[in-house]
Amino acid sequence: MTARMTDQQWEAQNGSLSPNEANMRGLCWHCSGKGANWTAFGGVQRKVTCGVCLGDGKSRR
Ligand SMILES: [Zn+2]
């Protein structure tokens, strides 16, 4: 059993880089190089593979 995170904690796992910062570092602008985006709504918490870099976190054009 894993500790349950609040929706806010769940979404805090998202990268915090701006698209420009991510680009300059060669990272995907959409997920800040994390390869996934975390979304939560009403206690339904999902980790979604990034559709831009397809999960590898690298910059795409
Ligand atoms: Zn990405």
Image (tube, rainbow, N blue to C red):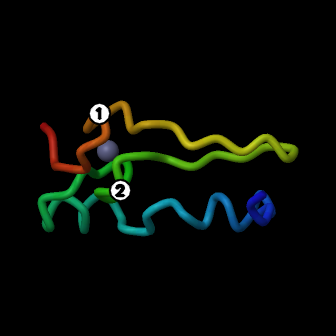
Q: Quadrant of residue 53?
A: top left
Say what secondary structure mark 1 lies in: loop
- Decide if residue 35 is on the left or right side of residue 45: left
Q: Quadrant of residue 22?
A: bottom left
Q: Residue at x 43, y 46 (%)?
A: 36
Q: Nearer the viewer, residue 5 or 22?
A: 5
Q: Quadrant of residue 12?
A: bottom right
Mark 1 and mark 2 lie on one chain; the one further toward the N terminus is: 2
- Decide if residue 7 is on the left or right side of residue 18: right
Residue annotated with mark 2: 34
Q: Nearer the viewer, residue 30 or 40?
A: 40
Name the quadrant of the N terminus. Answer: bottom right
Residue 2 pos. (x, y %): 74, 61
Mark 2 nearby-residue class (10 Å; few <14, some 14–19, many ≥20):
many
Q: Residue at x 17, y 49 (%)?
A: 58
Ligand 1 contact, mark 1 (Cβ < 8 Å): yes
Question: In 3D space, how far apart are the residues under numbered discs 1 and 2 (Cα atoms)?
Answer: 11 Å
* Residue occupying the far right of the picture: 42
Q: Give the amino acid type for the residue marked by disc 2 in the picture.
A: Lys
Residue annotated with mark 1: 54
Residue 4 pos. (x, y %): 80, 61
Say what secondary structure mark 2 lies in: loop
Ligand 1 contact, mark 2 (Cβ < 8 Å): yes
Instruction: State whether residue 37 is above or below residue 15.
Output: above
